[in-house]
Amino acid sequence: MPNTISNPPAIPFGDLRRQYRAIQADINRAIGEVLHGGWFILGERVADFEEAFSRYCGATYGVGVGSGTEALHLALLACGVDPGDEVITVANTCVPTISAISFAGARAVFADTDPITYTIDPSAIEPLITGRTAAILPVHLYGQCADMEPIVEIARRHSLRVIEDCAQAHGASYYGKKAGTMGDAGCFSFYPTKNLGAFGDAGMVVTNDEDIATRVRLLRNHGERQRYYHSIKGFSSRLDEMQAAILLAKLPHLDVWNERRRTIATAYTRGFECSDIVCPVEETGRYHVYHQYVVRVADRDRFRAYLKTYGIGTMIHYPVPIHRQEAYAEHKEAGVHLPRTEEISAQILSLPIYPELENEEVSRVIAACRGAATGDRCSR
């Protein structure tokens, strides 16, 4: 049974204050330098962070933009996705993945998911390819890379672009290659809750293709090649100096934070042995950075309510797949059916996993989950 200490302190699902307190001096110094410098948009710190993060990923170029959504949007355009084109992706993702496709004027086509990793199932991709297909957009979900080798091979055979959604995969890798470097472009979000998070919206496109990098740079700043000279029609999607400075201060800590997430994930998985809790699996050749630790349970509402009585915060990522969302009703009307995606969405539950969780808190989460579990697989 869970710890019976009366009124133990709550364990929030996330707590960004803890991270700030741990590196407060570095963050305050970075902010102060920007304020004293008096330059706030597309300055030296943006350039420094673009260089530092692209180098961290193993990519040649990095282009800072206003958000992860805009990273995807501008990467799609830079890769030649046009209105009326189709982009193959998944429905078990955060809606910005699909918003970006819509912004580009293209149509999302949904493939079902792998039953183990919940990322796109490569075997489901090729039957969806039509004459209108322009790109494949795999999502590196929850911190684990999709199975990229067959995806890239399919794209090569059909002359398609591959744009990686890396919003949850900072530092994740696939057979030694970092997320974002296996396709034509990798798109990152630095939303505050990410493994590497800013203090507001921020994003980046990384690529090894100079033409893609050049086009994203133009698109993010109204198509401006030099001040007041616009060579293409573009947008306003610029990473600001403040966020770049904060991210530069945080980047040296990312690998340590990711390792702490992995340590917590290992403790959870071991702690749930023999229970009927289905734990995430790190596939061979992958380095999972556990942006989320997502379990599957049969009676999610009861399980979640039980944890709440012990002050343990949880989330569901994501309760309604995109093809069942009101905003994308055209997919439901077209009869899109994704059996594995729909089954998984009814069972998944995300547990607290952030580097600042104390070991005692991890033990309390494990104990509460075991108390909520209804079965013992080892006794069957």
Image (cartoon, helix red, strand yellow):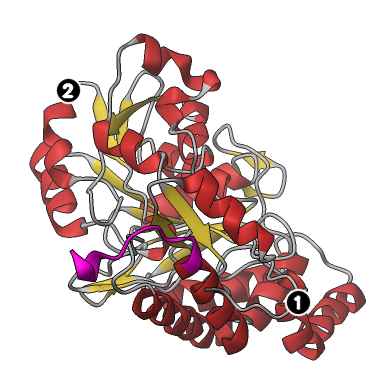
Q: How many marks?
A: 2
User: Farthest residue in the left direction?
Assistant: 157
Asked which quadrant contains residue 266, the reply is: bottom left
* 199, above or below 95, in the image: below
- Give 18 or 79, whichever is nearer the viewer: 18
Dot 1 amino acid type: Ser
> Disc 1 vs disc 2: Cβ atoms closer than 8 Å?
no
Residue at 77% x, 73% y is: 7
Is residue 54 positioned above or below 326 on the image? below
Point 58% across, 78% down: residue? 364
Q: CA distance from mark 1 to mark 2?
A: 60 Å
For the point 56% across and 44% down, the residue is 70
Q: Residues within 10 Å of mark 1 (few under 14, many from 20)?
A: few
In which quadrant is the C terminus drawn?
bottom left
Residue 83: which quarter of the image? top left
* x, y percent for residue 234: 59, 36
Q: Which residues are magenta?
A: 371-380
Comes first in the chain, label 1 or label 2: 1
Name the secondary structure under disc 1: loop
| Residue 361 image point, x, y percent | 61, 81
Across and down, in percent, residue 96 comes to 53, 40
Taking the magenta stretch, the answer to whether it contains residue 2 is no
- Which of the labelled discs sits on residue 284, or is there none? none
302 is higher (above) or lower (below) than 181: above
Q: Considering depth in this image, is 297 or 198 the residue closer to the camera? A: 297
Q: Which numbered dot is residue 130?
A: 2
The circle on residue 6 is 1
| Residue 154 falls left or right of residue 267 | left
Question: 354 left or right of 23?
Answer: left
Which quarter of the figure has residue 31?
Answer: bottom right
| Residue 71 visible in the snapshot | no
Asked whether, in this view, residue 371 is left or right of residue 155, the answer is right
